[in-house]
Amino acid sequence: MTIPPDLRGRRRRDPFWVAVNAVYNGVQRVRGLREPVLPDVRPVDRTLRLTVVGVRPEAEDVVSVRFGAVDGRLLPRWQPGCHLDVTLPSGRRRQYSLCGDPADRRTYRIAVRRLPGGDGGSVEVHTLRPGAVVTSQGPRNAFPFLASERYLFVAGGIGITPILPMVKAADRAGADWRLLYTGRTRASLPFLDELPAGLVTVRTDDEHGLPSGTDLVGDVGDGTAVYCCGPAPMIESVRASVPEGAALHFERFAPPPVIGGEPFEIELRRSGRTVAVPADRSALDAIRDVLPGVAYSCRQGFCGTCRTAVLAGEADLCSPADRDAGSMLICVSRASAGGRITLDL
Ligand code: FES
């Protein structure tokens, strides 16, 4: 029997086996025979086929896309902060935060800003029309929204997507919340008309100039949960300005810069190529120069899409599980300085 993972992608235990196991362990413990064990429940890869049921412009260069299940079934539940791994018709796989209503089991909504100089994913999303079919995995939650009495939300542009359902949930729960929403111009900010009435401050670069960390965070009391999503410089400003007594949770659009890296070499065994990885680039970025189709998604080490078998050499910055399995996440793992690693690519 296979049990689907929960919304955070964690293994779920079968309640029947949990009950059987509890009784069994109780008996065994009384008899002093053994430590508790649980049956091994394999995680399930929850792949869905979704069809586009609506596309709507939301702001300059931003569209929202609504998906429904191809087979018309109810969609798996999700919580604010969840994202979907979407495989687009071209085969590109990208992650998008869910920004609709978690109570709506018929549709998922994402919103995407078109980045013509990007890697093609956002441009492709903008070409989707009703009836197009994609596959998805998830929802997963790498940005969990935790209960608090007080929230400060900081969103930069399209970073509103995971924040919007959080703001609505905080508002419904009667929490004390405020939102600072920043961007280049008002016209570039999606979902302004959907924000609940409350303490919303819109701050745009064309009217107010670039915000400082203090502008972004303001006066934050102890015990405030600060949720922030936006471009890396904004997140760094917020991180530097949040006082110790507040809890900061953030999600980046893009991978963090490589800091303190060392150069190394990668041999791509199947392709017969050797790639030099400079100190300030990830292995993934260097490999993409010669293998543009290499699989990746989050570029931050949590989705697992870029996991690759290591055939020779030793990878640093690996989880123990990857090390044991002889694999590495090429978006974050590296070889030691001057080292060489051989990958199954
Ligand atoms: S791309 Fe997500 S873990 Fe590497």
Image: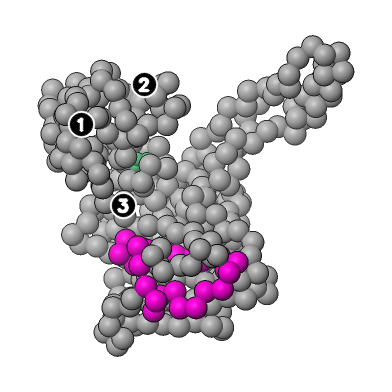
Q: Name the residue: 35% across, 25% down.
A: 327
Q: Which residue is mark 3?
A: 256
Seen in the picture, residue 178 relative to 283 is either above or below; the reply is below
Q: Is residue 270 above or below residue 50?
A: above
Closer to the camera in the image, 281 or 171: 281
- Name the residue tied to disc 1: 337
Dot 1: element: loop
Furthest-bottom residue in this view: 207
Image quadrant in which you'd find residue 267: top left
The residue that appears at 31% across and 51% down in the rendered structure is 255
Could you say which disc has been placed on residue 119 in the image? none
Residue occupied by mark 2: 326
Q: Residues within 10 Å of mark 1 (few under 14, many from 20)?
A: few
Q: Amino acid at mark 3?
A: Pro
The magenta span reads 213-237
Report x, y in % for residue 318.
Answer: 37, 31
Look at the numbered disc 3 and give the secondary structure of its residue.
loop
Q: Nearer the viewer, mark 1 or mark 3?
A: 1
